[in-house]
Image (cartoon, grey):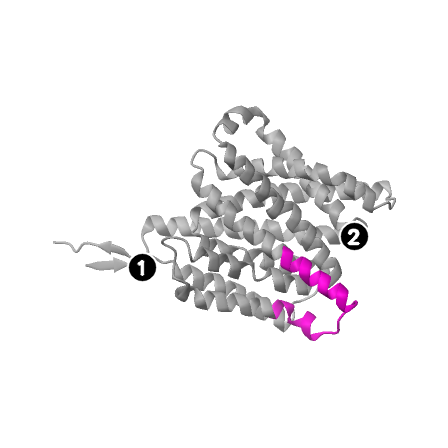
Amino acid sequence: MNTLPMSQSHSSKIWAGLACGMGAGAFWGLVFLAPELVREFSPLQITIGRYLSYGLIAAALLAPRWRPLVAHVPRHQWWNLMWLSFAGNTLYYILLANAVQIGGIAMTSLVIGFLPVVVTVTGSREHGAVPLSKLAPSLLLCTLGAICIGWQAIAGPSTGSPIQQLIGLLCAIGALASWSAYAIGNARCLAKLDRVSSHDWSLLTGVVTGAQSLLLIPFALALNNADHQVNAWLLFGAVSVGVAVFASIVGNGLWNRASRLLPLTLVGQMILFETLFALLYGFIWEQRLPTWLEIAALICVVLSVLTCLAAHRKPVAIEPAA
């Protein structure tokens, strides 16, 4: 009996999921430009602007078919939507923005770069998952890439007091834990929803996240009394809507699709594309070429995904011809 490297249906499913994961990372990478474009506003304000826009647009898209869609969502899944929206959107972005402002982008990227490791290790415990031993090369490359990204911050002189650095590190670790819980929980929820599409689940998440952002407005008003010019508010609105459409609606929709097409161990590796595209956008924004360490990190990211993809190749039995 002969074997082929991968069945045609399995291969097309993997490559479609890979394309969706890359697309999600490309759109999510835009999120890192938002704080640079609207530096006059606080992380809490940026979070509210992004997710309030996300909620309003998602509600408008779902309005014509709200009732039939809601009928297919069990009551317990609404509780899942609430905590997934909080963990994967609101809390994650607040912690991430604070970590960047306090500890710097490189340190935050180092910590967040371990997201694929956490998700992949957790996914390896799922029934029928690829053994962790086969994922070791991919995890090693992922770790090396994350170390390369943050090495400049570790080796360079520290900015700010040790307490500030500790607070920034704790915020980054909190963001890591928050989004890891979201990625794992979201993949498991999608696996149990047969009558709700990935796109609709993303829009429902947006509606819930938008409702949560309304609760944050009083805190933003109390913590920030700075006056902004009309042009600043117009730019803030444009950035909020742009990030909501491309990163939250399109990016989340692609991510949910990838979560359905790929096993959790491979879904975790797709998060690396967010770091990859964020770095590329950063180079364009700063109008510079990457350093050798950054080039090494990009190579590790690509090789990590390729080795993880190779670990998921399934042989298919072919009966010999008479």
- Amino acid type assigned to the residue bearing label 2 in the image: Arg
Residue 211 forms part of the magenta stretch: no
Instruction: Give the percent coordinates (x, y) of residue 240.
Output: 71, 43
Q: Is residue 216 left or right of residue 73?
A: right
Count of numbered badges drawn on the protein: 2
> Residue 5, labelled with which disc?
1
Residue located 44% across and 43% down the image: 191
Between 199 and 84, the one lying in front of the other is: 84
Between 87 and 257, the one lying in front of the other is: 87
Q: Is residue 107 left or right of residue 16?
A: right
Q: Is residue 202 left or right of residue 309?
A: right
Look at mark 2 in the image and give the residue it sits on: 39
- Amino acid type assigned to the residue bearing label 1 in the image: Pro
Q: Is residue 218 left or right of residue 252?
A: right
Assign the C terminus to one quadrant of the image.
Answer: bottom left
Q: Which residues are magenta?
A: 148-174
Residue located 31% across and 59% down the image: 5
